[in-house]
Image (cartoon, coloured by chain):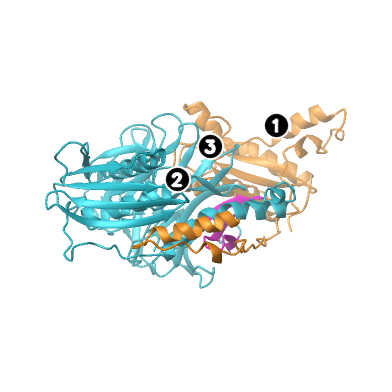
Amino acid sequence: MKTGVRGQGSGIRTRKAEFRYHFKLVLLLIFFTLAPCPLPLASSEAKIYIDITSPGIRQLPFSIHASNSPTAKEIESIIKSDLEFTGLFSFVDPDLRGAELIADIDVDVSGGLKVILSLKDLVENREVLKKRYIASSIRPLAHSISDDIYYVATGGSGIFRTKLSYLVSTTSGRKELRLMDWDGKTSVSITSKGLTSSHSWTQDGKYLLYSTEKDARWKIYILDLMKFNEMVLYSSAGLNLVGGTSPDDLISFSSSKEGSSEIYLTDIYGKGLKKLTMALGIDVSPVFSPDGKRIAFVSDRGGTPQIYTMDSNGMGVRRLTFEGSYNTSPAWSPDGKWISYVGRINGKNQIFMVKSDAGDVRQLTFNGNNENPSFSPDGLFLAYDSDRDGKKGIYIRRLHIEGDRRITPRDINASSPKWSPYFK
Amino acid sequence: MKKLFIVLLLVMTVGCAKKYTKPAEKTAPPEAPVKEEMVTEDTKMDTMRVDERVVGREEVPGGGTAGEGTLPADDQVKSIFRDVLFDYDKYDIKPDARPALDAVAAYLGQNQNINIVIEGHCDDRGTNEYNLALGERRAKSAKNYLTSLGVSPDRMIVITFGEEKPLCTAQNEACWQQNRRAHFVIVKSKFQ
């Protein structure tokens, strides 16, 4: 890539080089985005092997067999890791009996990377999927195969090609925004200048919004992931923190431009400003329900920070949390039924979930401080950060069959994951 | 860059190659058109230099200019612009913080050539976003108090860093108390 440009040292040139560097990743995203493909099922009626909507989910006995090359083995191991963490597959040695489905992965590395996936139903002894892939990058290819296997097995869309945006502490008082795969790999820096705090995806996955402090100003920026240009979405005196986005591309944020921090809406051009709250205290962290009709937010109007919900026009305010004196950071589940949040209990911050129409509070974490919950687009996983093993890192909680895994390395301080939507 | 573009074309086919089709390598343009746009920033704060070293060079009443008298002057200014401390999850000015703020107001009254930035900070027990809002309230409480003593609000700028710039990182009340602060930074230039 343009190393000559990168070495020039002038601010503008360096920035261009930085953009080119990021461009690669972004285009990867976009091309996945623009190439939606029907999954070719061999049979006309789709059989569901695992019903993820049933209360007692069974694990599907599954075998995977890859051709004998280092590349094939690497692809196999990524797919295994993907499927394993869903908790929905139990792996059976392909040489032994017992699997109901077997994935045969044939990799040809002569002149590029070509893979043929053959998925066989061993009970009915028929091929249920055959697909050919051409790629040059192993990880997106493997995640793509995982998605296809997952779709055949469950009838649902896998989250293996989704991304997470998150923050990494660099020098003191600075945090940069990064993107990574759902398994924590392929991490790329998005913006490294200043101190970045809250961030959010638009629901089509095409833009990232974030609040960054530079030169003592907190502004909201919008990054077009297709063109990779960054624009100021909203700038005013005071603190401007982006909250979330609605299905029709409204952006909720908090601003203290008139003194106290209040909730506002704007469109993605920074126009059509609408003020929703007038509480004088702190109102912050507004996030839309998936249907865009309600907004959850944090307010100290009752004396301590608590989660409230309101209609997206600012009416119908209801307090949602009553236990404890510190409840913040709401995140709405994709089906709209739950709100995850951070509550302070016994001197530590923990992740909770509460029904969005009130009641049924559940505590999800118990060790260390656990903050910043964000649901996967299928609602089966929850990303959050935790300091339970020392430095803050990003963890993924499996909600349907309890399980946790840390996806960021132990030597970096990573926090505030925000799960992308599906890239359509 | 060419290689990159081919990669992308190849990746594009990953999702949907039902049958093997030759990738369109030949049609790939030599370089992906990277659109660039420099961000045009609001430059209001560009003239402001937030630089703590200014404190040591400041002329202080009764003291000499920066030079051999730097150290005493430095100490004197620092002793005036002490951090204002707050209780956990609170942003009201505590009674015991008032004398220090009174001294700051008096100093600003005698030194019309300087302005201040008030930084609001929190301990790290809260959550990041809420702490940014809380830090701002703390800085604003200090500003409002100074305004009530006659300091022009135009001479004070408020910025919050929440829990992102701690003075110390130990997990005990002594350290948390140090971090729950409004911190003053003296600047020479005017805010316009």
Is A50 or B78 nearer to us in this picture? A50
In the depicted view, which residue is nearer to us: B154 or B3?
B3
Chain colored orange: B
Please tell me whether residue B138 belongs to the stretch shown in magenta. no
Mark nearer the viewer, 1 or 2: 2
Q: Amino acid at mark 1?
A: Ser
In depth, the one of A316 and B6 nearer the eye is: B6
The chain carrying label 1 is B
> Which residue: 47% across, 51% down?
A112
Q: In the figure, is residue A310 to the left or right of B116?
A: left
Name the residue: 79% across, 27% down: B72
Residue labelled with disc 2: A416
Q: Are marks 3 and 1 in contact (CB under 8 Å)?
A: no
Query: Looking at the image, do the residues carrying marks 1 and 2 touch, with CB atoms under 8 Å apart?
Result: no
Spatial distance from mark 1 to mark 2, Cα to Cα?
A: 38 Å
Q: Are marks 3 and 1 on the same chain?
A: yes
Q: Give the residue number, with chain letter if any, for mark 3.
A: B180
Q: Earlier in the sequence, mark 3 or mark 1?
A: 1
Q: Which mark is residue A325?
A: none
Q: Which residue is disc 1 drawn over? A: B79
